Image (cartoon, rainbow, N blue to C red):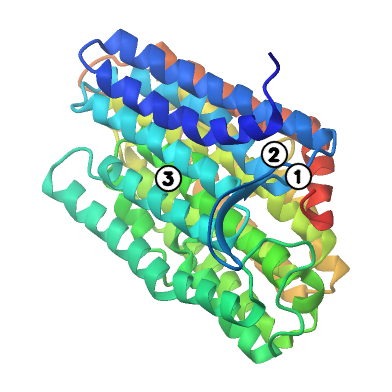
Amino acid sequence: MILSASTALEIAILVPLVGAVLIVLAGRWPNLREAITLTTAIALFAVVLRILWSLTREEIIEITLIEMLPGLSIAFHTEPLSILFALIASFLWIVTSVYSIGYMRGNNEQHQTRFYACFAIALSAAMGVAFSANLLTLFVFYEVLTLSTYPLVAHKGDEAAKKGARTYLGILIATSIGLFLPAIIWTWSVAGTTDFTPGGILEGHMSGGLATLMLLMFVLGIGKAAVMPMHRWLPAAMVAPTPVSALLHAVAVVKAGVFAITKIIIYIFGLDFLVEVPEERILVYLVGFTIIVASVVALRQTNLKRMLAYSTISQLSYIVLAALVLAPLSEIGAAVHIVAHAFGKITLFFAAGAIYVASKKTDIPQLSGIGRRMPWTMTAFAIGGLSMVGVPPTAGFVSKWYMIAGAFQNDNYFVLAVLIIATALNAGYFLPIIFRAFFDTEDVPPKKDHREAPWPMVVALVTTASLTLLFFVFNGPVVDLEYGILKGPG
């Protein structure tokens, strides 16, 4: 029996939840537990591919579970941006699961069953975010994603982990309840609906100044996008194990934030409406400020994971900035950078975790000469770093190309200046690490003659580094798919 499209959409959200239950039941048998994790991840990716197949055949998939009031319902649908996010999250869950097996065992981590179960619940929430048909559904699953990742951030259980997790939860809940939810209620009150609609739903319902205020509430209320000053949760969460950092930075959490903002700009406000709102430039300046300042802070870091955290803050704002340029090519650039950043940044965090497991090194000055001991890991790190800079032949070059082309479309020289300055800053903190790893001599010999991390970790980081390179050549299908964004759902 062939799985129907509507059933596939329902299963995409249920599969990780079923997997979480089975993981808990198999907690006493590590091999079985991890086999269930991998099987669930593969099954989810297969289901998302089935949904993609329906979209390529222009099949409309819409499901309404509950309608509480006119214009307020829990509902799901598919469109190109949703499929892109779902494909990234589901595929990278497979790779991250392989990596996690090597990391959690190699580092003798405690509470591994809880870790895998919460990870699965977070992926279910990510699927709910991806396929949300309206703002209310998006909000519900956005909150589930926050709550399910809290135990992961606090995983180590020490005081630093608890403090970082409190900061993580506090900022994300405060921003969503204090700004995101009121913006949703305001949208419903003026438009009578919160449905994601081609061309937007707000034109004719509010003036430019009020629209800018509402957009500001959305951008700052979706704290997972980490636009300053709502960014502090992200560096605080670096106390978590590296696979969790990969989840936060590449697989689900931050991608849910920038995905939500991009979707709101396109399907709630509409590009044509925002073009007529000159006050919208205020947000362009705020996001540009975030890109530059986060890059400067990253330049000053000595801890590798904290440097990567601030790099993420900057790179996320690239996506928001591209969406706010309101040019067709820049919208494509925003969507493509979701992919490019996912592959590149997860590679970087995988490499950081491999370095820690193999050598217990966490600071950048300690990395002198490590490329000769861990050539696979540091080559992958170099590829990920060059992608963040935007150097060919990496994925980051493709997305920056579209962003720059979009800025030229709108003669937006502020955005061009931001991209140029940020690229120089990115080079300023990634290239010295690469040089240090391969060309410097070790200042302090390691306590033991370490080599590469356990093979599942190496396989995972080599896979994502390879995808970072392959996307430079084989980006056509993603670009073609994302042209459908401008057409809207269905």
Q: Say whether disc 3 or disc 1 marks the residue closer to the N-terminus.
A: 3
**In x, y percent, where is residue 114?**
25, 30
- State whether residue 217 appears in this view: no
Judging by the rendered image, the residue that carries numbered circle 3 is 248
Q: Amino acid at mark 1?
A: Val
Judging by the rendered image, the residue that carries numbered circle 2 is 395
Judging by the rendered image, the residue that carries numbered circle 1 is 398
Q: Say whether disc 3 or disc 2 marks the residue closer to the N-terminus.
A: 3
Q: Are marks 1 and 2 in contact (CB under 8 Å)?
A: yes
Image mark for residue 377: none
The residue closer to the viewer here, 417 or 369, is 417
Quarter location, residue 85: top right
485 left or right of 223? right
Looking at the image, which residue is at 44% across and 63% down? 223
Mark 3 surroundings within 10 Å by alpha-carbon count, few (fewer than 14), some (14 through 19), many (20 or more): many
Label 1: which secondary element: helix
Q: Are marks 3 and 1 in contact (CB under 8 Å)?
A: no
Cα distance in 3D space between marks 1 and 2: 5 Å
Label 2: which secondary element: helix
**In x, y percent, where is residue 463?**
57, 21
The residue closer to the viewer here, 159 or 46, is 46
Using the image, determine if residue 386 lies above or below residue 258: above
Q: Amino acid at mark 2?
A: Ala
Quarter location, residue 395: top right
Mark 2 surroundings within 10 Å by alpha-carbon count, few (fewer than 14), some (14 through 19), many (20 or more): many
